[in-house]
Image (tube, grey):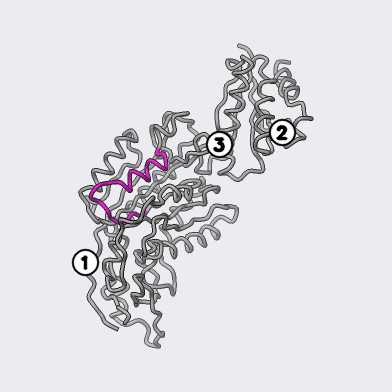
Amino acid sequence: VTEIAASEKPKECVIFLGASEYPHLSSELNRPQFEASAQAAEEYFESTTGFNIPHSEILDLFDTGDEVYQQLLAISTFLAVRPGVRAFVYYIGHGGFYKGEQYYLAARNMRKNLEPQTGFLSKSLADHLRAVPDHQGQLFLILDCCFAAQMVKDMESESLDHLETVTANKTLESFATPGVAVLAASSKWDGAKAADTYELTLFTKCLLETLREGILNAPSWLSLSDVANEVSRRIRLTDRTHHGLPQAHAPRQTTLNLATLRIFRNNAPETADLFVEQAGVLKEVREESTAEGPTAEDEQRRTARWPTTIILAG
Amino acid sequence: VSYRPKILLALPDSTLGRANAEVAELQSFVERSAADQGVSGDVSIETIKDSIDTQDTGTVLSIVVAGPAAVAIAHGIKSFIAKRGSRVRIYDDAKNVLVEAEGGAAENIDIAATIEAYRKSGRE
């Protein structure tokens, strides 16, 4: 086993999309939970116990009055000057199907019967995000809306030939391998929920609880899949009548499945702390528990923003 | 001001996603049928939500019926059922079930008569 010091934490940015009000549509679509959720999520991404992303690295288009094409331009401008930066795109709002086929995410200025032109048509948004010149960073889409997993299909790459193969001895590069992962609030046929009972949407409430509180006895860094499973568990405990459960997908897989990449710090008090690189994927190694409890070094690892040590197997 | 009764069309057997997708198709069938029969001006259709709690854009068709458009609406519903096989439930605007139509049985249900009777009942 060889130990190497990890490089600086990967650079990250986040883009918020969606709306809490839709002035050109029925007022029944307006939900204050969307705005509260966007604010809470942004606070988490900025917080030192969260992603600690500087404000300058946040593009907040939530509730903007800009038309969709202006928002798409803003996104590409933002990403183009951040080559290789891991980007989170967090949408909160309504999802729907136009003419029964084309999936879209509602935008603030969306018009009835013009959803593909005035909302975020899933295919167009996916193509736009994939095609930003000079970005080529990892994309993590977090979609808090109905039928969210429908967008996974649209994020699938037509060709993976141009993507590099990750080799086992390129541990750190695995954090920078291009690709896409999607955390969808619901399957493609199920709903997401924003009930008056809660201040936030059900999905974002349970997601932020998971990220803030962590998962007991799980690895000290969590993947999108780990998070999706825990959010599902929390949703089932919170609202037993709700059917739509989150899903994690990696529609644009290279040799690295981004949904299994451990990028979320586990804030639970007891975690497993070591990572082993195997065939390009970080895997955790659970240590035998000691009677003395966690050492100062364990605590330092737990509270660090990024793993201080990566163990290479071999 | 003339009385303009409203009926609601829902797809009770569909998941939320399928209902959201199919309700747009149902709307197309009803609009086409109304156009074919020259009563487009007597039918006003919009998609509304079944529950404000869900993050979808609507799964229920709300149809304001004016004039003798009942036959056209019924024809649109039956054409949709013939294609999709979905069950369509028709409510009045107080969400009382007026009639339910499904599969081949839809042919034997006089949807038009039901809608027309409802439309006329509001004027009494």
Pointer 2: what residue? B97
- Disc 3 designates what residue? B49
* Picture residue at 29% right of the left edge, 58% below the top: A47
Marked residue chain, label 3: B
Could you tell me the amino acid type at mark 1? Glu
At x 57%, y 40%, the residue is B51
Which callout, 3 or 1, points to the residue nearer the camera? Answer: 1
Q: Position of residue A233 (x, y in %)?
A: 52, 62
Q: Would you call the spot at circle 3 few (<14 residues within 10 Å), some (14-19), or many (20 or more)? A: some
Residue B19 relative to residue A103: left or right: right
Q: Is residue B73 magenta?
A: no
Where is A114 relative to B5, above or below? below
Q: Which mark is residue A8?
A: 1
In this rendering, is residue A193 above or below A309? above
- For the residues labelled 3 and 1, the Cα–Cα distance comes to 48 Å
Q: Which label sits on residue A62?
A: none
Q: Disc 2 vs disc 3: Cβ atoms closer than 8 Å?
A: no
Q: Report the chain holding disc 2.
A: B
Same subunit under labels 2 and 3? yes
Q: Is residue A216 left or right of residue A160?
A: right
Camera-nearest label, 1 or 2: 1
Q: Secondary structure at mark 1?
A: loop
Image position, residue B8 (x, y; %): 64, 30
Q: Amino acid at mark 3?
A: Lys
Q: Which image quarter is the N terminus of chain A in?
A: bottom left
